Image (cartoon, rainbow, N blue to C red):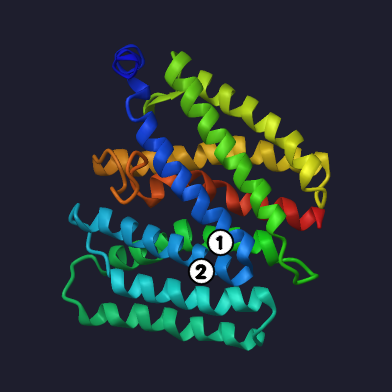
Amino acid sequence: MFTKELHRKYPGMSNFFQRTVTGIAIVTVIIGAVMVGAYSFLVLCFLINLLGLIEFYRLFQIHQHPVRRGLGVLLSATLFITLCPYILGVVDPRVLLINLPLISIIYITELYHKSDTPFSNLAFIFLGIIYITIPIILFFSCAVGFSDKLYHPEIILGYLFLLWANDTGAFITGSLLGKHPLFERISPKKTWEGSAGGAIFVTGVVFINNLFFTEISLAGWAVIGATVIIMGTFGDLVKSMMKRSLHVKDSGTILPGHGGILDRFDSLIGSAPFVYASLIFQL
């Protein structure tokens, strides 16, 4: 009875419990992969990238945009299996050269497709790589992409806690108090109140991170927290812009209550390049 009343009074909370169950499962898997070691974290990043990229290509494919999904996935996988081991320091940098002829081959293959829009087809392949694969590789680099070549799981955990705090705070506060749209043309349900709630949650986690993850200073965590608030929000808005242009509600259905991979990891995709850049200057 209470649940029905809550759903009636606050429509934005209608899928809160489903989101919670799925969210707990996602958090458990991610934390487990991060804690086990660098290679399990690499596998996790590879799967997020692969599923997100397939989802991205599928969205444009079903809206009659020709996309060479196989070539895009091949290039993405090759980037991962060359760049990430190089970041770990376990392969010679010359292995990165494998990617150069593959990029040229992708251009050449378009010669043999009877398409009126060959360069649009190519553009979608590389757009998926730029939008998804590169940020996820930089997310992986946040753990190991530094001069010491050591694995730093505490950095990833602290970063993830800030992301989750921002998303959770924005969702709860926006559902309960949200009245003023943040960017109505792109995402009418995202509000300034929700963003403020996310910022408050992030601020609290910044201080908690400083207590337990001392490899980064309080100022450093504050910079990462601010980056998550700002660029994570922009990542969400860019994903919303994509969905609005394609007239879809969710990017997928693989995560009940959350939608697709891109719906769940949009803030990470938007913020990872900036968080990695900030870490380069800190470590």
Q: Nearer the viewer, residue 212 or 64?
A: 212
Residue 248 image position (x, y, % from top left): 25, 41
Q: Along the line of sight, which residue is nearer the eye, 193 or 187? A: 193
Q: Check disc 1 and report its element: helix, strand or loop.
A: helix
Kindly identify the residue that appears in the image at 46 percent across and 21 percent down.
Answer: 174
Task: Give the spatial CA distance, label 2 vs label 1.
Answer: 8 Å
Q: How many marks?
A: 2
* Residue 51 in the image, given as x and y percentages of width and height: 37, 61
Residue occupied by mark 1: 33
Image height of 232 relative to 183, above or below: below
Q: Amino acid at mark 1?
A: Ala
Residue type indicated by callout 2 = Val
Q: Which residue appears at 48% of the width and 63% of the height?
A: 133
Q: Nearer the viewer, mark 2 or mark 1?
A: 1
Instruction: Please tell me how crowded label 1 is: few (under 14), some (14-19), or many (20+) other residues with Cα within 10 Å.
Output: some
Q: Is residue 70 left or right of residue 44?
A: left
Would you name the residue on which mark 2 appears? 43
Q: Quadrant where the C terminus lies? A: bottom right
Kindly tell me whether residue 178 is visible in this rendering. Answer: no
* Residue 272 locus on image (x, y percent): 59, 52
The answer to whether the residue labelled 2 contacts the one labelled 1, judged by CB atoms less than 8 Å apart, is yes
